[in-house]
Every structure is written in C-alpha cells, then in structure tokens.
Image: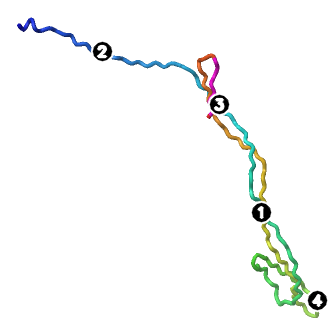
Amino acid sequence: MRHDEASETVPVLEEEVAVEKRSRVTGRVRIRSVVDEIPDVARAALDEERVEVTRVPIGREVTERPVVREEGDVLVIPLVEEVLVVEKKLVLREELHVRRLVTTETVEVPVTRRRERGVVERVSMDPEGPEEEST
C-alpha cells in the first residue's frame, strides 16, 4: 500500500449543548395577616395586709416614758398619762399591741388575648380560583 492510497481524512465532529433559562410567571402569592381573639382567664394572687389592734390595760406607775418596741410580730406602742396627785407621776395607762396579718386571695379575671397568624394564598393563573394555605 502506498502512502497516498492509505491515508484517508476522517472529520471529527463535536456537539455542544447550550442551556438557557427564562423566568416565567406560573402564579402569584398573596400574604395577609389575621388576628385571632382567644378568650382566656388571667390569674393572680393578691395579698391584703390588715392590722389587728388589741388594747392591753396596764395601770402601772413608771418613772420615764417607755419606748415603742417589737415583741415577735407585734409592735407595742406604750401610752402614758399624767395624773395629778400631790406630785406628778407617769402612769403606764395601756399599751397598743399591733399585729400585721397577711391574707392571700387568688382572683380570676376574664381577658381576651390576640394572636396574629399569617395566611398565604397561592393565586394561580388557573381560572378555578386561589388555593389557601394557612401557617
């Protein structure tokens, strides 16, 4: 075989692919917020403080005015009186014993709470109407 007869040219082909993207509207979305009202009961503990006063008669003669003092949870307030005798003396007439009393009461008050939620509606190009999706 001769060199001229044996050589044949075979063309080499290559295909190339080009990908293009285009935006296309297939539907729309509408988002709205909805406020739901939820009936509820608010609970709280209320403390009430009141005082109880007990008068304790003493009738004892003292040389000086006694001081206000606390005995446990009782506040003792001495009350004195000047009595006319040939001489003037201090007489402890009575004491006021004041005790604090605390009571707790649980109250319930009806209230309305509001919670907001989003509603997403898909508005399609389909004439049948929108689909609703709640979140």
Q: CA distance from mark 1 to mark 3?
A: 45 Å
Please give the residue where the numbered disc 2 appears in the rendered image: 15
Label whose residue precedes the other's in the sequence (1 or 3): 3
Q: CA distance from mark 1 to mark 4?
A: 49 Å
Q: Position of residue 18 (x, y in %)?
A: 36, 17
Q: Position of residue 84 (x, y in %)?
A: 94, 89
Please give the residue where the numbered disc 4 appears in the rendered image: 84
Q: CA distance from mark 3 to mark 4?
A: 88 Å
For residue 127, what is the image quadrant?
Answer: top right
Disc number lying in front (4 or 2): 2
Q: Secondary structure at mark 4?
A: strand
- Residue at the (58%, 23%) spot, across then down: 28
Label whose residue precedes the other's in the sequence (3 or 4): 3
Outermost residue, top side: 5
Q: CA distance from mark 3 to mark 2?
A: 51 Å
Mark 1: which amino acid?
Thr
Q: Position of residue 12 (x, y in %)?
A: 22, 13
What crowding class fits label 4: few (fewer than 14 Cα within 10 Å), some (14-19), or many (20 or more)? few
Please give the residue where the numbered disc 1 appears in the rendered image: 104
